[in-house]
Image: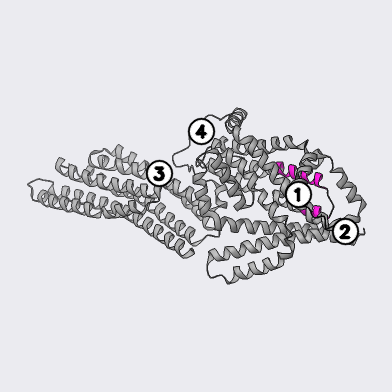
Amino acid sequence: MNDLNQIALLTGLLGGLALFLFGLDILTEALKLVSGDHLKTLLARMTRNRFVSLAAGASVTALLQSSSVTTVLLVGFISAGMMTMVQSIPIIIGANIGSTVTAQILAFNVTAVALPLVSLGFFVYLAAPRDDYRQYGRILLGMGLVFLGMKIMSDAMAPLRDFPPFLDLMKSLDRPLPAALVGAGFTAIVQSSAATTGILLVMAAQGLIGLEAAIALALGANIGTCATALLAAIGKPREAVRAAVVHTLFNVVGVIIWIGLIAQLAAFARWISPEYPSLSGLDRIKAETPRQIANVHTFFNVANAAIFIGFTGQIARFVEWLIPLRPAKIEPRYAPLHLDPNLLDVPPVALDAVRLELLRLGNLVREMLEAAIPTVLSGSPLHLGELRVMDRPVDLLHREIISYLRQISLADLTQIQSTRLMAYIRIANDLEHIGDQVAIGLVTSARKRIDENVVISPATEAVISRLHAVIVEAMIGSMEALEKEDGERAAKVRAMKKTEAELIEKISFHQVDRLRAPEPQRLSTYAREIELVEELDDVFKTIRRIARTQLGMFRRSSEAKDDRQ
């Protein structure tokens, strides 16, 4: 083989691999956008029982086309407090089953449809009137590039059938352990077991590698795919690290179980796979061996799942012993608990993490609001200072949420996701504004009361306290609507305007009576009480604005879903 042939071979292999990985990336990103809302539903079902979790893990991985992505997402879920390590184990086991879907698809003679898929996908993406339709174009384009990459690699490898040094190298892979190590190393480098599987299918179709060696390499790929999750777990909470270790242990032990049974696996693969006795030579190899590899890949992952699904409790206890929890670090109240960067790959899940963080922000604001009136009506300057200090965590957590939402906005979002993003920005800003209304508006009013020696009468305190209770109730209702994603609760908050208006009218009549009273400070008292009521009314208006934002978000999301059906 001369230098020109070697250069052509290398450029063909590397170019084909690059196209394969690029197409896989386009395919995965488009599938995330199209299936993202379904991932939220699957996530909600993941924790019901181990078998539902197993099926959910397989389904998510089949959608995302990558067990590594699934495991990285799990690391993000655990780090964000959306799931425990124990709950993640059946999902991790199921993820390996879902990853075999790619091999089953690639085992078909897909190269013939590569260019039609590329052209069709490109024109759908270019001409589609709506973003969700464009994503289907990207799916077709990504699949076409994956298949085209396989064709280019296959054509580049064809001359290797007559290249003795390469054939000698392939013979060395007949030994299971070296082959498994090569498969693990290559998969760790490209961070895609699908790429390893695709290359194996191409090599097998060219007669460059036997079934036994391909099985050993595929077993190694199961280990190499763990590298992505282990890297993602660096710097994460111990629970998240444990999930990555579970993934690694499961795959390593699974390979150990089967590494000595490769001959039996090969015989089983030949038995369950279709045969083509009418063909001969390379044509028969091309028709039979890729499907045998795909089938055995599916079999040992399903078999491993069947073996380990009954031992999730024992696996959890072993990993907990292996990686003990560190003493709990007390995080500042403003430190975000749910905004994990690993979730940014799937915008709907990242947006759900923002929703959970908004609930925390709302809880901080509610605590401020609950403390406000007792402090404002009768508190000392020291108490007012404490109320202002409570606004600091609100401001800092608000900043973290807005920063995370900015990162989400950089992704290619659907209409529904964009609607949620904008709504969450407005809700975060309104919650922060309520904190300012309490810490600045109400506290300033209270300082004037102290400076002017104004004493609020018990009767006035009682009426203002009732108004305060209605406002706190509205605040709680708006956060419950956000937590449950319930439009009816948000509508009830909007409907509380009548109750609040009646109380303000009652206070106004009471203020007129106070103004007529023969008290030396009646003008100062009237001014301070009216100012206080106006500040509370402004807070209530902001809470109603949050409810209105939620109603708009729910309505537009529902309309967008109806348009898609």
Find residue 1 and report its image quarter: bottom right
- Residue linked to disc 3: 392
Looking at the picture, how far across and down is residue 62, in whole percent? Answer: 62, 51
Q: Which residue is mark 2?
A: 159
| Residue displayed at 72% across by 35% down | 257
Rendering coords of residue 18 (x, y %):
73, 58
As helix, strand or loop, the secondary structure at mark 2 comes to helix
Q: Nearer the viewer, residue 313 or 418?
A: 313
User: In this view of the protein, can residue 121 be seen by the observer?
Assistant: yes
Left or right: 3 with respect to 380? right
**Does 379 appear in magenta?**
no
Taking the image as shown, residue 14 lies to the left or right of residue 432, namely right
What secondary structure is the stretch in magenta mostly built from?
helix
Residue under label 4: 329
Residue drawn at x 84%, y 43% as measured from the top left: 173
Q: Position of residue 534 (x, y in %)?
A: 24, 53
Judged by depth in the image, the label closer to the viewer, 3 or 4, is 4
Tell me if residue 21 comes above or below residue 71 in the rendering: below
Q: Which of the two discs, 2 and 3, sits closer to the camera?
A: 2
**Given contact means CB atoms under 8 Å apart, are the residues at marks 1 and 4 in contact?**
no
Q: Which numbered mark, 1 or 2, is in the foreground of this view?
A: 1
What kind of element bears circle 4?
loop
Residue lying at 25% horizontally and 44% vertically, measured from the top left? 469
Query: Which segment is the magenta one?
Result: 201-223
Residue designated by label 1: 292
Looking at the picture, tell me which residue is in the foreground, 324 or 416: 416
